[in-house]
Amino acid sequence: MRRASGAVHAPPPAPAGPGRRAFVTGALATAGLAAAGCAPPDTLISGDTRLRQWNLFAGGDGNRMIEMHDAYQAEHPGIDFRATTFTWGAPFYTKVAMGAAGGRGADIATVHVSRLESLAPGRLLDPIDPALLAEFGIDDTVVLPNIWEKCFFDGQLYAIPIDTHVLIQYINLDVCRQAGVLDADDRLVEVSGVDGYFDLLREIQGVTGGYGLSMDTWNPWSNFWALYRQQDGELVLGGDDFEMDEDKALAAMDVMYRLSEEGLAPRHSRDADTAANIANGHAGLMIHGNWEIPTLEAAGIEFSAAQFPAVFGNHRTRGDSHCYVFPHQRDRDPERTRAAAEYAAWMLHNSLTWAGGGHIPAYQPVVESAEYDALHPQSEYREAAENVQFEPEAWFSGSAGRLQEEAAGALTTLHQGTQTPEESLDQLKGTIRGLLSVPSPV
Amino acid sequence: MATSTPPAPRTAPGPAATASRPAAPRRRRWSVGSVALYTVATLAALLWFVPLLWAFATSVKTEGDTTVMPPTWLTENPTFEAYQLVLGRGDILRWTVNSLITTVIVTVLTLILCVLAAYGFSRFDFRGRPGLFALVVGGILIPPQTLIVPQFVLMTQLGLVDTYWGVALPQVVAPVFVFILKRFFDAIPRDYEDAARLDGAGPLRVLWSVILPLSRPILTAVGIFTFIGAWNNFLWPFIVTNDPEMMTLPVGLGTAVGQYGIQYAQVMASAVLGAIPLLVVFLLFQKHIVTGVAGAGIKG
Amino acid sequence: MTQNTRAPAPRPAPGPATTAPPGLVDVRRRPTDWTGLWFVLPFLAFYALFLLWPAVVGFGYSFTDRSLAGGDVSFVGLDNWSETLTDPAMYDSLWNTLWFTVLSVPLMVLLALGLALLTDHARRLGWFLRLSFFAPFVLPVTVMTLIWGWMYNPSLGLFNGMLGRFGIEGPEWLFSEDTAMFSVVIATAWWQVGFNYLLYLAAMQSIPKDVYEAAAIDGAGAWQRNGRITLPLLARTTALIAVLQLIGSLRVFEQIYLMTSGGPNFATRTVIQYIYDSGFVGLRIGLASSMAYVFMVLIIAASIAQFRLFSRKEG
């Protein structure tokens, strides 16, 4: 038999070994059982309310969320709860949109409020009944108005905010103490204006021998937006044109350009490099999102934090809000919708744990509590929630949106020193013009 | 069975060797040339195993040991902790079951549809036959990858996104197998069918009791290749499933591992677990797979 | 594909005998017999619904501003087509696809040939060699990309770790625009070469023994045997493998998407990924449809040209 095996036609078929036959039979049986219903087998058996949550938290905030979910599940034994973390950014938003288009996606998902418009509220997102939410104690009285307003689209509520997250300034206490730039309470001495801030960085640089400030030069849009908004710079996006305060944009870009040009900040810093630079003392300060707090805690250095530096005279900062949305369902089940609303409210009520990851809770009773007051360095920058500057609403703006991604091309060159602010501004204007010329997909 | 084939020199060199080289007596002396040849061959084969071995070596380390530089092959504290953690999450098991369900649906339906169509085209004359057959053969040229967008829209309209049927159904359209099976059926002489027909067997009966038994080898080849192709298909299941609980093994491993972060022992443990099912199938069916490739030259 | 015309027939293949075989007599009593159609119909139904219909409506979508997010759809004429054809990123992705093909086809043909020659000569190891060279082919793509992504890791991976032992600072592999595509091609070759390898092996082992014996009598050594007999006899197989590999390489998407997501800086984004990015990430069904059509036409043209070339060689 073995010798003839090469001839494919051999009419008496080789007797299949028992192992193989059993394998095939088993496979068929499994498929037959499961294909009958579309849902995975075990969910057919369970009588619990099914609740599926999708999110994009993989770092320190992800760990906080898992901790909260464990507590939630312990308190809700009747809910068959499952959370899934997708890769941050476009992969996550694509799955949310495709799942909603198919109508069998998540019951509830965590998105950036700045991305609401790009998720086509009313079609990919289902509206949330404010009365249902109020039953669980969430309404406009417990959330800051600047955030709550962002959750509406065409007069209907689509999002439930859990936090505000912003760019803040981190302080390496060892380095800054040596540089003599701290007061008795370990707070940075107050400086104002570009020159004052640069002088401060030079003093710190004297101690580190490396940089004064660590910042992400790879995704610089957020830094730019904060600096631009500190000067009251406006970006008005029209149908096919836009208005921008060019002088203010140039001033913001000039700060970014000079920071790297004068060696006060790195030319290349991305991903984990940025936090590493302050953790290992190559820099004394860092501008980064408040979600880096767990990273620095894990690094074991002595650090504090403050609002975004007042480079242009105030502490405005770029920020966004994580919020819960209800992706569209083909057959919306009232029981699961109710469970989803209750889950969101529970997470808000318990967002002190969430604050541990650096985010500023949206639920005001938590922020005003004594426990939050005791959280350090979180309580140092809680006013930042009122200084948060959102991006103009457009389908391409917002966190992990196309504007942020494509503007990086122009802005990174400032840090690299390959373009002057004037050249960079021209490129940025071209980028925005290009995005406006794309027909809106929503 | 292939697994029991010993690598002994005197037996036929294995399934792919056709009968044209029977067990001819071979030289027994080892010349310098053949020593060099065997050395090179062995080294190449071992080199080919490096990625899998490295994955395994990483998977039995502790997370701390995975990031030690320079990397070591053997860890001092081997542990199956990573496997326990990965299996404990349950995802991999669920994705494997999903893969099995959808793959079996695809394989069974593909075989049924393609056999019926090939038989129809091979044995019957009907109006429009040449045109329809040309249409089917022309379909071989259409790259399914370019149809993902309208196919997904169709699935939203049919309500099949995030369902097993949504994963399986578009994959059962395999015009190339109709073509291959028809050519095979064409080559089976009609005389074989006459006896059955004289006994009063209808066309289905003839197909079942005459054609199919004669076609076991090609059916096995088509079945195995459909199975492997469907099991390993990434693009379509990736498009049509968003709910992690509905994902197949390749899609789940590629999409929802965000939660593993950079825990390389766990990532490699899940890679090893993901490799096992088809490696087992391969070892069980090695002979059929090898002759299948050799005989048909089928490739998606 | 030709090998199986030899294999299946218990006797010499009777050729396309379907026109008037004796066995059809009783089935064709009536002038119009639809039995055959009933057999063909189930397949055709699936074929029409899942292949032809998407191909047709996709063409229709390309003239609209249809969005994945739903909403009103309006006719936009040739806007999507002109955007596709004037978009530099579209040409970049076409170039990336072509570059992958140019790198991968020769590599995966020559590598397969080399490994097959090795196996054909080292017969005592036949089973072991076939196992090791073909096994990667059955791995799911994600398993391959997870493993190679880990080996390629610039700071902790196996490759740079090994190079580091010799004091060499290894490249950034998947993280540099200069090396990412090469890294993907190498990993792809390891993963997929087994199929071509088996095709070669089968062709080699079907070369009649007496051809070699005649050469041995003429005093040809092993190298000459390879050069003068084996390789020329493999020309047709090589052509077949090259065609299949070329068509396969042009359709590349998944391993690149999984290893680099098309980066860094889009240096490895292929056309299929750009279609995915436009249609699903960017929600623009209309635009993605026109891109898909442009690419489909290119691939079909390339396939037909290749098969023509191939069949001319054959004749």
Image: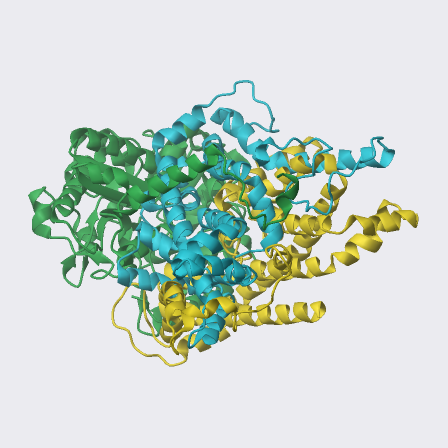
Chain colours: A green, B cyan, C yellow
Q: Nearer the viewer, residue A304 or B198?
A: B198
- What residue lies at 20% left-to-right and 54% top-to-bottom? A151
- In the rendered image, residue B97, in percent from the top left (x then y), is placed at 36, 39
Q: Nearer the viewer, residue A322 or A427?
A: A322
From the viewer's perspective, tell me whether residue B129 is left or right of residue A209.
left
Q: Nearer the viewer, residue A83 or A129?
A: A83
Residue A300, visible in the rendered structure: no
- In the rendered image, residue A84, in percent from the top left (x then y), is placed at 31, 41
- In the rendered image, residue B98, in percent from the top left (x then y), is placed at 36, 43
Q: Is residue A204 above or below residue B246?
A: above
Which quadrant holds residue B87? top left
From the viewer's perspective, tell me whether residue B199 is left or right of residue B163.
right
Dividing the image into 4 quarters, which one contains the C terminus of chain A? bottom left
- What residue lies at 81% left-to-right and 33% top-to-bottom? B35
Dividing the image into 4 quarters, which one contains the N terminus of chain A? top right
Which quadrant holds residue A69? top left
